[in-house]
Amino acid sequence: MANKLKVMLVDDHALVRRGFRRMLEDEPTFQVIGEASDGLEAVESAEKLQPDVIVMDCALPQVNGIEASRRILAKRPETAILMLSMHSEDTLVRQALEAGAKGYVLKNAMDLDLVSAIKKVAEGKMVLDPQISRGGTLKGERDTGLTARELEILQHIVAGKSNKEIATELNLSVNTVSVHRANIMDALGIHKTAELVVYAIRNGLVNLP
């Protein structure tokens, strides 16, 4: 990688930011270009520093991480945001993804691989903590009535790909992919992409990378 990946850290605890900074500065392809301790500061710094990836704490003073992400992405949609949280509740995960976060990982996970997670979201991949997909409401695989083609398209949706990208990859028209996406949501009784992603992972309908 010729150009280093510019990373910004947002957490209201200086010790946490310092720990993450040390972890990331050992990675030669990263450059930590700034830090913020609350949501408002995060929005201002993101506009000024223009990071490639923001590691965003969910629970922040002033403005929480989800709202800060929404404001940042409204101005800089190309920024990849990795949400860190102590909580694995469906509602929070869904809100973070709806706000545009590319990933949601738990801060207290013993196997937290921040470097790998940052690289994945920078590449446009979706990253969800394994504990979320193993969570208390995990129902296991079930008969959803989806066709093999719909499950294939669902896999691409979970990977964060647009209808156009899926159409190109599967050699289909964009309209066909749109119809499949609508049929999937209809079959599962889900109306938002973020909810679809969480549902698909929790119910073992897709393979996580």
Image (cartoon, helix red, strand yellow):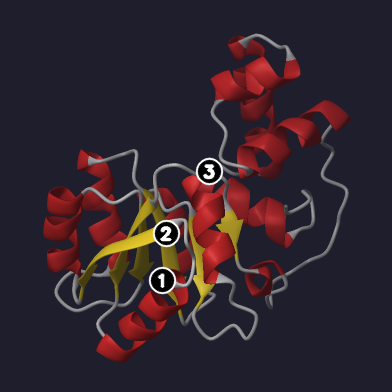
Q: Which residue is mark 1?
A: 25
Residues 162 and 202: in front is 162
Question: Which quarter of the figure has residue 144?
Answer: top right
Residue located at (19% from left, 63% from top): 42
Question: Which quarter of the figure has residue 159?
Answer: top right
Q: In this picture, is 134 found above or below 149?
A: below
Judged from the image, the secondary structure of the residue bearing numbered disc 2 is strand
**In whole angstroms, how far apart are the C-alphas of marks 3 and 1?**
19 Å
First in residue order: circle 2 vs circle 1: 1
First in residue order: circle 2 vs circle 3: 2
Q: Which residue is mark 3?
A: 123
Q: In this picture, is 4 found above or below 23?
A: above
Judged from the image, the secondary structure of the residue bearing numbered disc 1 is helix
Which-is-in-front pick, marks 2 and 3? 2
**In whole angstroms, how far apart are the C-alphas of marks 2 and 1?**
7 Å
Query: Marks 1 and 2: in contact by CB < 8 Å?
Result: yes
In the rendered image, the residue lying farthest to the bottom is 15
Q: Is 109 on the left-hand or right-hand side of 70?
A: right
First in residue order: circle 3 vs circle 1: 1
Q: Measuring from the top left, give residue 99's x and y in whole percent.
A: 36, 51
Q: Within 10 Å of the Cα at label 2, are there few (<14), some (14-19), or many (20+) other Cα atoms? A: some
Q: Which mark is residue 30?
A: 2
Q: Is 146 on the left-hand or right-hand side of 33?
A: right
Q: Is 76 on the left-hand or right-hand side of 122?
A: left
Q: Measuring from the top left, give residue 91's x and y in whole percent.
A: 47, 66
Q: Within 10 Å of the Cα at label 3, are there few (<14), some (14-19), or many (20+) other Cα atoms? A: few
Residue located at (15% from left, 49% from top): 47
Q: Amino acid at mark 2?
A: Phe
Question: Which quarter of the figure has residue 67?
Answer: bottom left
Residue located at (44% from left, 42% from top): 2
Q: Is 33 on the left-hand or right-hand side of 108?
A: left
